Amino acid sequence: NIGAIVSEEFEKMGFNRMCIPTLHPKKLWEESGRYDAYGKEMLRIFDRKENEFIYGPSAEEPCVDMLKQANISANKLPINLFNIQWKFRDELRPRFGVIRCREFLMCDGYSFHQNIEQSSEFYDNVLAAYKKLFDRLGLKVIIQEAETGEIGGLKSHEFLVESEAGEEEIEYNGKTIKLLELGHIFLLGDKYTKSMNLYIENKHNEKEYLTMGCYGVGVSRLVSAIIEHNHIRSEKGISLNLPAHIAPFKIV
């Protein structure tokens, strides 16, 4: 139910759903420059011919490569893609159940525009739409600017909810609150398209590298966050009071 809601909201934002492979050829990550930069959290796998693949922690590289092979022209833009797919990060200390585990279900979207102005406008629209998504799930999120980290780019925002199992602390309304990240979006610019040579030619036959954004929501994390916000502790144990459109059953 949660995945269906996330999918519906992404389609409202203008994304088209597809299925991106979980394993990515090593050469794509070498092209982008992330192969060495990502570090030990990235799982590397070899097939029977000793070809190396990455179990994708995110999917910027295969999306750029797909558009490059499709020979995209300006009249096909913008292109906005998303999938809900399993990801893998070899966390140093996996903990808190499904909040921080090595394999996790994530909705990740990728936008491609002709220039940074168009990308930035779409990014701002997604920023506003994310709040509607979390409102629909009954979660009151705090939105704050964040570092771009190993993903990179020009700017990013993260979406946080107050939680005892959270891993971040901030000063908010005069008090310190621990927080759990549920979503993160990035305005990437041409970080990936330039290194991987994804461009269109303008009327002067000059290269114009496409600009990108990427947009993530932790679907498996949402399950835990929603349970935390809708449980009741009593002498009989823990009971759940979930919204009807999220609950797995109408009647138990």
Image (spheres, rainbow, N blue to C red):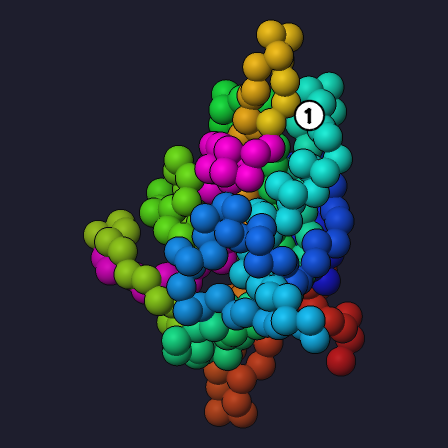
Identity of the residue drawn at 69% across and 37% down: 67
**Residue 118 image point, x, y percent:** 55, 22
Q: Nearer the viewer, residue 53 or 140?
A: 53
- At a point 67% along the width and 36% down the height, the residue shown is 68
Frontmost residue, 78 versus 95: 78
Q: Which residues are magenta?
A: 175-198
Q: Is residue 245 magenta?
A: no
Number of numbered discs present? 1
The N terminus lies in which quarter of the figure?
Answer: bottom right
Q: Secondary structure at mark 1?
A: loop
The foreground one among 190 and 226 is 190
Residue 136 in the image: above or below residue 202:
below
The residue that label 1 is drawn on is 77
Residue at 74%, 54% in the rendered image: 19
Q: Residues within 10 Å of mark 1 (few under 14, many from 20)?
A: few
The residue furthest left is: 174
Left or right of 89 on screen, residue 137: right
Q: Is residue 165 left or right of residue 239?
A: left
**Which residue is most to the bottom?**
236
Q: Using the image, determine if residue 214 lies above or below residue 161.
A: above
For the residue marked with disc 1, what is the amino acid?
Leu
Residue 138 appears in view: no
